[in-house]
Structures are given as structure tokens and as C-alpha cells.
Amino acid sequence: MSTSTILSKIFEPVTHFQWWKDWFVILLGCTILATGFVLFINPYNLVPGGVYGLSIVVHNFFPSWQVGTISYAFEIPLEILMFILIGMKMSSRTVVAALVTPFIMNLISLAVYPDAASLQALDSSKILGGRLDLSEHLLLTTLIGAFVVGVGQGLVARTQATGGGTDIVAMIMQKYMRIRFSRALLFVDGMVVLFGLLVIGFGLGGAPTPPNSIHLSLYSLIAIFVCTRTVAFVINGMKEEKIIYVIGNEPMKELRDYILHDLNRGCTAIKSTGLYSGKEKDMLMLVVTQKEVMRIKQIIKKLEPHAFIVITDAYSTYGEGFRPLPNPSEIIPE
């Protein structure tokens, strides 16, 4: 048996496990996403962008249709675009997520509303027997709903899929227009909110206007912002990398050795000149994690007490010891 065959046998279970893990995360994300809409978004006529936000607007014209059911009418053309412009691998996951999420949304809606009439009206006072009525706390339900929806979207996006809808438009804009995913999503969802303002806020087309309908559109903008920031956080996590610049008059050999051998980090030495003193100086540049910052400062104080130090955030760090460079089709929310 060849070495390559042995290695493939060893790593096959890991690949198989990763496959199941990705699909579990997709289904979990879809469930969280659907729950956020059903409990905190749909009953209050909030329009946080996306196909589901658009479906909430359309629901005002056709109350007998569930929001999840309406979304299928928008998903199918967008899925076709996904197959054509993005590719099969990512599309297969997105197709499943886009088809499963409305179905889960409809199931949860049937479970939390006591009868068909309250479901058609999306009556918040009837959700779970009235135990989750937040109609007097619109800001609270906006923040909670946007956070929950963002977590769901972020989990799905971590598997290089999306929940469908305007996420697909944002991915296409990212791939072909080089716009970051979260910014593209913010733009597209903003257009959906504008449509919601015209329909729900101003009663365009004869749609019923709920109380404080203008305010609902403003809350929707808050929901979009919170949701997009949550998506970015779930995908990228908290940015912990820091860039440290150390400027000294000496070659700083002990500090170099410590960084390379004890800290086990790469470092770049840059020749520089102090404009005030006119002296030649050495500048070391290294990238460390947040946890290593205090440690490196203590070592610098011990080995180079007269050095000048600048510490700043690293926006994105790629390379050995950090993140791999993204693929051209990879979702980059930040």
C-alpha cells in the first residue's frame, strides 16, 4: 500500500466528520435564523432587509400567506443566479439553507401561534400564549431579533454558504465588484428597508399601516446594523491581533532572539532614521495576539528599557501562524 493511500485512509474520517459538522452548523444556523424572525421580527412589522424582510412587506398585501411561504417566490430566481455566477459547490449548501429556513420558519410559526387568525395577523400578543409580547418594547425586540438573526446568518456563512435571498446578491457583489460581504449586504438590505418604508410607513398600494409605522422603518435600520455586525463577528470572531513597532538605538539582539526563539514569532527588522536626532535606528515590527501583548511589553521593558514602542490593531492578518489567505469566492465580512 502506497504512502498516499495510507494517508488518505488516516485523514478520511476527519474529512467525513467535517462534512457532517458543516451540515449540522448549516441546519443550526437556519433554525436560529428562523426563530429570530418568527419571535422578534415578523410580529412587529420590522423589515431588517433580506428576502424575509421583503416577504414581511408582501405579507401586508396577502396576510393569508405565511412569511416563509412568500419567501420561496423570491428565492428561486436568486438560486438560479447563484448556480450561474457563484458555482455548484457553494450553491448546493445555499440551496439547502434557502429551502430549509422558510420551512422551519413556517413550522415554528404554527407552533407559537394558537390559531390561524392570529398567525395571519402576526399578532404578537398571542405568541406563546402572550408570554413573549414585546409590542411595548420595540427597541428591545429589534436588538434581540437582529442579534439572533445575525448569529444564524453568521453560522451559515461560516460554512461558505448563505441563507439565500439578498445574501446571494451580496456574495455576487463581493465576487464581481470587490465589495466586502457585510457592506454589500448592508446596501442591499437598505434598499429593502426603503421599500418597506413606502409600503408599511406610507401605505403604498393600499397596504394597512400599523401604529408608529414610520418608526418601524427606523427600527429596521437599527436591526440591519446590529445584524451585519453580528454576522461579521460570528464569522471572524474578535480581532485579537496587534502590531507592535519597537524602535531602538541598538540592534536589540536579545530582544530579537527572544521573539524568534522564546515567543516563536516572526519579526521584521527595518532600518530607519530619527528625523530629530538624525541617528540610524533599528525598528522591529511583529504581529502578536492580544494575550501576548502584556508579555512582550514586559520583556521589552527588561531588555530594551529605552526603546520607543507603538502598539496598534491589525485589521486582518494572513500568513503562517495566522489565517490562510482567502479564496476568491470566500465570504469576507470585514
Image: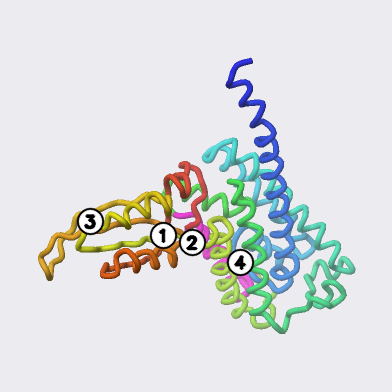
Q: Using the numbered discs, state the Cα–Cα distance from disc 1 to disc 3 in whole angstroms.
A: 28 Å
Query: Is 187 placed above or below 124 here?
Result: above
Q: Which residues are magenta?
A: 180-205
Question: Pointer 2: what residue?
Answer: 239
Is residue 188 a member of the stretch shown in magenta? yes
| Earlier-in-chain disc, 1 versus 4 | 4
The kind of secondary structure element at disc 2 is loop
Which of 303 and 178 lies nearest the eye of the viewer? 303
Whether residues under marks 1 and 4 lie with C-beta atoms below 8 angstroms apart, the answer is: no
Q: Using the numbered discs, state the Cα–Cα distance from disc 1 to disc 2 in whole angstroms.
A: 7 Å
| Earlier-in-chain disc, 4 versus 3 | 4
Question: Pointer 1: what residue?
Answer: 315
Which of 173 and 242 lies nearest the eye of the viewer? 242
Question: Pointer 3: what residue?
Answer: 251
Of tags 2 and 4, the one toward the viewer is 2
Of tags 2 and 3, the one toward the viewer is 3
Tell me if 69 is positioned left or right of 320 in this view. Answer: right
